[in-house]
Amino acid sequence: MSSPVLDTLAGHRLVPVVVVDGADQGLALADALTAGGLPVAEITLRTAGGLDAIRAVARDRPDVVVGAGTVTTAAQVDAVADAGARYVVSPGLSRAVVERARHHELPVLPGVATPTEIMAALDLGVETVKLFPANVVGGPAALKAFAAPFPALRFVPTGGVSATNLPDYLALKPVLAVGGSWMVAKPLVDAGDWAEITRLTGEAVALAAPSTKENR
């Protein structure tokens, strides 16, 4: 099933996994990412202010494709949908989360780490999954192995991705996009070092560009 939001993520090939606390940090980070050429953010619910950040970015920066990460319950899906999230990302596979996201007509990327979980996701009609934690379960080699019996599935590997191994993931055709946090590291956010986040984002965008062209 085609999704304009997932098509946008595929076009950028990078999904910054963001941990911010509140609307002000969320908006400043959205500015920094956009300045670096990446108007995409997965704002996680790992902090009390994550939901407020999603709401602020969705309201004030409609040019940024903002999603909600670390969504683990159906109630959280309701909350992020109300806040304006345009997609949902979960660390694991939950029927309740998938079905609630579908109720809100939001693309959902459930986390998988085994072939059994992949098959369960396919049974729920999911065509794109988050491979998590990607490096722990075997990195690009594991992704190749998983892709062989599931050729129609697309992956968003997340967890342990860095500027060093980003090209290895993006070289794989089943990869829709790659999730990472190195360009939006929490110490940089807490320090308000938006210029460094913009610089690192620009570097990541440049790294992703050649792979984007090769896979099209």
Image (cartoon, rainbow, N blue to C red):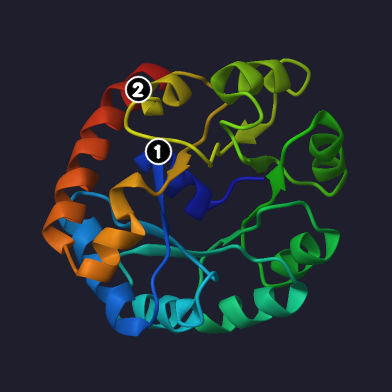
Q: Measured from the top left, where is residue 117 in percent x and y?
A: 82, 39
Q: Nearer the viewer, residue 11 or 19?
A: 19
Amino acid on which the number 1 mark rests in the picture: Arg
Find residue 154 and report its horizontal and vertical position in percent. 62, 33
Q: Which mark is residue 37?
A: none
162 sits left or right of 104 in the view: left
Q: Quadrant of residue 31?
A: bottom left
The outermost residue toward the left is 195
Residue appearing at x 45%, y 82% in the figure: 49
Residue 61 seen from this side = no
Marks 2 & 1, CB-CB < 8 Å contact: yes
Quadrant of image for the N terminus: top right
On screen, residue 128 above or below 76: above
Q: Which residue is mark 1?
A: 13
Q: Amino acid at mark 2?
A: Ser
Foreground pick, 208 / 103: 208
- Near mark 1 (Cα within 10 A), the count class, few <14, some 14-19 or many ≥20, is many
Q: What residue is disc 2 on?
A: 211
Choose between 141 and 110: the one closer to the eye.
141
In the rendered structure, which disc, 2 or 1, sits on the residue that comes first in sequence? Answer: 1
**Under tag 2, what secondary structure?**
helix
